[in-house]
Amino acid sequence: MKDTKKTVALVIAVVAIVLLGVLGVVALNEGNSEQKVDDTAKEEAPKGKCEIDECMALLTPEMTVAEANEVIGFEGEKDETGEKYTWQLTSKSKIAIEYKEKLGTITASYNKDEIKDIAVKMSVGYELQNLLRDGTSYTYKETVEKFGGVEGHLATKAPTFERYIWVNNDGITFGATFSDSIDGKTSIISIR
């Protein structure tokens, strides 16, 4: 009888130790995941007045550097080799404007992890690429419809064209350039 009581007490003690260990690991993991989320949010907070998509929508090729500084909310860094200015919005995203003859070509470099979209199907991208090779092109609005209503991200805004990108969940990028010279339809499509 004494041995049975000792065995039961030993089993209860082992179970209690195991449960405390499991609860401790769960609590430790929850604390670590919250810390990682907070660190990521702090790291990716944009510098300036606007998020990258919003800045791209507000900027125009006709704007001066001073006007672009005002829209973005801080001064761009001038490239030593020419008339190119860069605004680093986050550690992984930036906007650059290169001026030629007082007009700018505005380019956005996105953090692809932030713009990945599970709804973007590259089968649609390949279909559009093949149609362009065969002479059929689409406007931005028609391209959005082909992608099931998924809006693209404005990657380049120039005096005569705009380029949008879509990124699928695997990080594959579909890019389409819409040219003013062909009524805003696609002139170039790339998948990478």
Image: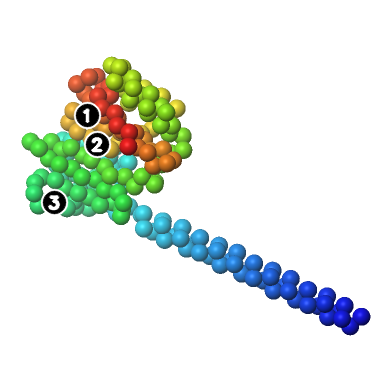
The location of residue 25, given as percent across then percent down, is 59, 67
What residue is shown at x 22% (from left), y 29% (from top)?
161
For the residue carrying disc 2, how many other residues have a C-alpha within 10 Å: few (<14), some (14-19), or many (20+)? many
- At label 3, the amino acid type is Lys
For the residue carrying disc 1, how many other residues have a C-alpha within 10 Å: few (<14), some (14-19), or many (20+)? some
Spatial distance from mark 3 to mark 2, Cα to Cα?
Answer: 19 Å
Image mark for residue 161? 1
- On the rendered image, what quadrant is the N terminus found in? bottom right
Pointer 2 residue: 156
Left or right relative to 32: residue 177: left
Q: CB of mark 2 within 8 Å of CB of mark 1?
A: yes
- At label 2, the amino acid type is Thr
Left or right relative to 146: residue 7: right
Badge 3 marks a residue whose secondary structure is strand
The location of residue 32, given as percent across then percent down, is 50, 64
- Identity of the residue furthest to the bottom in this view: 2
- Identity of the residue furthest to the right in this view: 1
Which residue is at the front of the view, 61 or 67?
61
- At label 1, the amino acid type is Phe
- On the rendered image, what quadrant is the C terminus found in? top left
Q: Identify whether 166 is placed above or below 113.
A: above
The location of residue 126, given as percent across then percent down, is 37, 27
Spatial distance from mark 3 to mark 1, Cα to Cα?
Answer: 24 Å
Pointer 3 residue: 78
